[in-house]
Structure formats: C-alpha cells, structure tokens
Amino acid sequence: MNTTTPTTTTTTGAATSTRTRSTRARGAAVLGAATAVLVVGAAAVPADAAMPASAAASNRPAAVSTSLAARAAAPAAAPTGRRASRVVYLTFDDGPNRVYTPQVLDLLRRYRAKATFFMIGSAARANPALVARVRSAGHAIGNHTFSHPWLSRLPASKIRSELRRTDAVLGRTTCLRPPGGFVNGTVRAVARSEGKSVQLWTVDTNDWRRPGASTIGRRAVGGARTGSVVLMHDGGGPRRQTVAALATTLARLSAQGYRFERLPACR
Ligand SMILES: [Zn+2]
C-alpha cells in the first residue's frame, strides 16, 4: 500500500529549459501537484469501473487534508486484488513533435498503455496529423497553452486567450496543465470558467534536463505509486533520452503489475 505523500523529492515544477524560477513558486507548484493528484484520485473512483472505490481509497496517500479526505470518501465496493488497482498516469508535455511523438506512441501501443498528452497549441497547429494520431490511439489530449507562457504572470484575459487559441486547434479540452506548473487563483478561476481542471504531476522525471535515459527511467520507476502522475516531455527539445527511458519505465512498471491510463479528468 502506498502510504507516502505524493513524491516531491524530484518535483520541481519545471517543464522546459531556459527558465529560472523562484523557490517560492517552486514550492507552490509542488503543493499544487500534491493537491492535483488527490483530486484526480477522487475523480477516478466513480469514473473508472476497473478500479474499485475501496481499492483506490486504500491507496490514497496518507497525508490527506480533511476536506480532501471527505471529498474522496467513496462507497465501499467489493475488494479485489491489490494489483488490480495499480495504475500510473503517464503524461507527456510540449508536443506534438514529429520525431518523438510517434516513437512515444509506438512504445505505448506495445504495452497497451494509455497516456495523456498536454499539447502546445502552436505545435499542434503545425502537426495536425499527429494530433489525430494521438487521439485515434485512444490517448487523452490536454491543453498546455498556445505559446507556453507562465500563466501565473498573465492577466485573466491573456490566460483565457491562451486556452481558447489552443482549443481552437485541439477541439475542446477538459484539462489544463499550466506551463512550469505555475498556478495561482487567477489561473484556476479562468481554467474553471473554461471548463478545464488543472492537472499537475507527482513525479517529475526532469527529463528535459537530459540527465541520461537511465536517470530518467529510475526517477519514473522509483517514484511510481498507484495514482502517480508522471511528467515527461515528447516535445520542446531533443527527447531521445525520454523515449529510451519510457521503454524502461513501461517494461519495469508493467512487470510490477502496473497499468497505464489516461488522466480521468482529461478526454
Ligand atoms: Zn511545458
């Protein structure tokens, strides 16, 4: 049973290179990530028939605030084996990319894994066939803004414009991953009014720093618990290490009995 809090040791909220960030913002992103996964878990209980509510609840991180715990309370269901509830949510940001996204898709298919792709609107506009391929393979697609700005620095009108321009390319999305994980009250309010839930992560592989495929894979495999949301990137730079690490991650976690699903809030 997972009794740890969502992994924060490798979570930096970082999404792409060439940025600096304040320690405070980083902390906010970490807190946001912890909150996000709990909401995800709560949403997954009724939505996912394959995951008994009791099993999902029993795998919830121990450090749950009262309000979240209350919201997560679910009616008891017939218990099944622990392995049945082993789910990890793989997420890929900054694509689609014509070189790496197809490689990611091929690997996912090999393991019958579903994932969530948080696409940048401008990249999606340049690669409509890839968007279609991701969707037809059964993966979820989320909104990662049109031009990848730090949304927490923008006024509501600009945030809204980023989301809508992206949806104009992708079709209506139901979840948002803010670049860098930077969220504030304005970002959350606009996302809500645009019908999107904010989805962060609990395991940051920091693959964009290119620390080597083995390091990326070790972070993903070592950080994975039931309900973990793993952040990787299929675009925004060279991602050969990520692709290699993904192969390892899929193989090892599959061997441990994990399966890989789309984030329940994203379609
Ligand atoms: Zn990003």
Image (cartoon, helix red, strand yellow):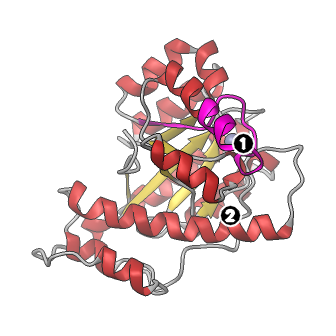
Residue tagged 1: 241
For mark 1, give the secondary structure. helix
Q: Is residue 39 above or below residue 209?
A: below
Q: Which mark is residue 114?
A: none
Q: Which mark is residue 29?
A: 2
Q: Which of 34 and 110 is in front in this view?
A: 34
Number of residues whose C-alpha sits closer than 10 Å to that of mark 2, classed few (under 14), some (14–19) or many (20 or more): many
Q: Give residue 21's quadrant in the image.
A: bottom right
Residue at (40%, 61%) from the top-left corner? 40
Q: Give residue 204's quadrant in the image.
A: bottom right
For ligand 1, the image quadrant comes to: top right
Q: Quarter of the image containing the N terminus?
A: bottom left
| Residue 112, image x, y percentages | 35, 41
Q: Give the range drawn in magenta.
A: 140-162
Reply yes or no: does residue 108 show up in magenta. Answer: no
Residue at (70%, 74%) from the top-left corner? 9
- Tell me, yes or no, if residue 8 can be seen here: yes
Residue at (43%, 80%) from the top-left corner? 2
Q: Nearer the viewer, residue 173 or 59?
A: 173
Left or right of 143, for residue 215: right
Q: Confirm or reject: label 1 Cβ below 8 Å from ligand 1.
A: no
Residue at (33%, 67%) from the top-left corner? 42
- Tell me, yes or no, if residue 256 can be seen here: no
| Residue 69, image x, y percentages | 36, 81
Query: What amino acid type should be assigned to the residue bearing mark 2?
Result: Ala
| Residue 82, image x, y percentages | 27, 74
